[in-house]
Amino acid sequence: MSAIALAFSDGMTIARRNLIKIKRVPDLIVFTLLSPIMFVLLFAYVFGSSISIPGVSYREFLMAGIFVQTAVFGATWTGLGLAEDIQKGIVDRFRSLPMARSAVLVGRTTSDVVINLISLVVMSLTGLLVGWGVHTSLLEALAGFALLLLFAYALSWMMAVIGLWIRSPEVFNNASFMVIFPLTFVANTFVPSNNLPGPLKVIAEWNPVSAITQAARNLFGNTHPALPTPDAWPLRNPVLATLGWTAIILLIFVPFAINRYRKAVSR
């Protein structure tokens, strides 16, 4: 068996182990799903009445941002899980097994995809209840969800680096929020980027979260000609920008995570 096939096979074994843990401790997934549902209800019914989006109801505009926020938050499972495994000594047990070194990382990031898929299904049902809808074809809608999962998968590798660097679940939670909150709020997730003041507007336009949010809105048909045309290239070509950002994140953080993992398990 080739090294790549072995890493994939061992990675799937680790992914199953992570998902079985969630099955045994359902509270983990329950509280993960409650947070974005609360965001939907809060923004849709509390702030939605005071935010006007030309040509589109705020609830339809909002849902793509909530989908992205849910996917970004779901990516933190990898880093948190790695930090817990290192702290509890589980990684040391993996070292004694005849398995590929990268299997733990592959398994962790893969299980994140499954968790994010479950989260997106729940969020879609919640969105339908508050008035969100898809106004494009089935293929475009599926492409939107696939793009969300791909982007979240890339972020999982970034979170893996943070988890391996910090190695403390409690500190990881604080550190990851310092990354996640600027990414998700200084963007077009909840308000159009044109509504933001000068410097924040530029940051939001080039924020990868804005690109994936705009791509999701386009693919779900939650846009309108009355909305101002974005000036920045990433928002005028959001699908290409998202694929580009995803490739950049993977190229940087996959080797970085593998290198950090090797150092972590060699101590």
Image: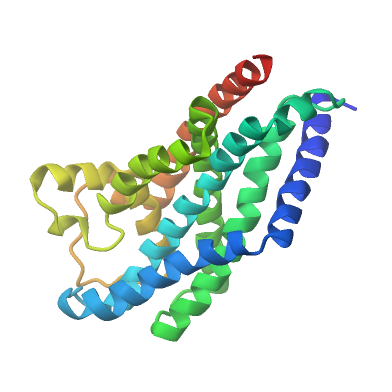
- Relative to 81, say whether 120 is above or below: below
The image's colouring method is rainbow
As rendered, which of 223 and 212 lies closer to the eye? 212
* Residue plotted at (12% across, 42% down): 199
In the rendered image, residue 108, in percent from the top left (x then y), is placed at 66, 41
All told, the count of numbered labels is 0
In the rendered image, residue 81, in percent from the top left (x then y), is placed at 61, 42
Q: With 200 as the anchor, is 113 left or right in this view?
A: right
As rendered, which of 174 and 129 lies closer to the eye? 174
- Relative to 57, say whether 106 is above or below: above
In the rendered image, residue 213, in percent from the top left (x then y), is placed at 37, 57
As rendered, which of 183 and 163 lies closer to the eye? 163
The reply to whether residue 134 is visible in this rendering is no
Image quadrant where one finds the N terminus: top right
Going by the picture, which residue comes out furthest to the right?
A: 1
- Relative to 22, say whether 111 is above or below: above
The reply to whether residue 95 is visible in this rendering is yes
* Residue plotted at (36% across, 77% down): 41
In the rendered image, residue 246, in percent from the top left (x then y), is placed at 48, 40
* Residue plotted at (76% across, 55% down): 20
As rendered, which of 249 and 85 lies closer to the eye? 85
Image quadrant where one finds the C terminus: top right
* Residue plotted at (29% across, 72% down): 43
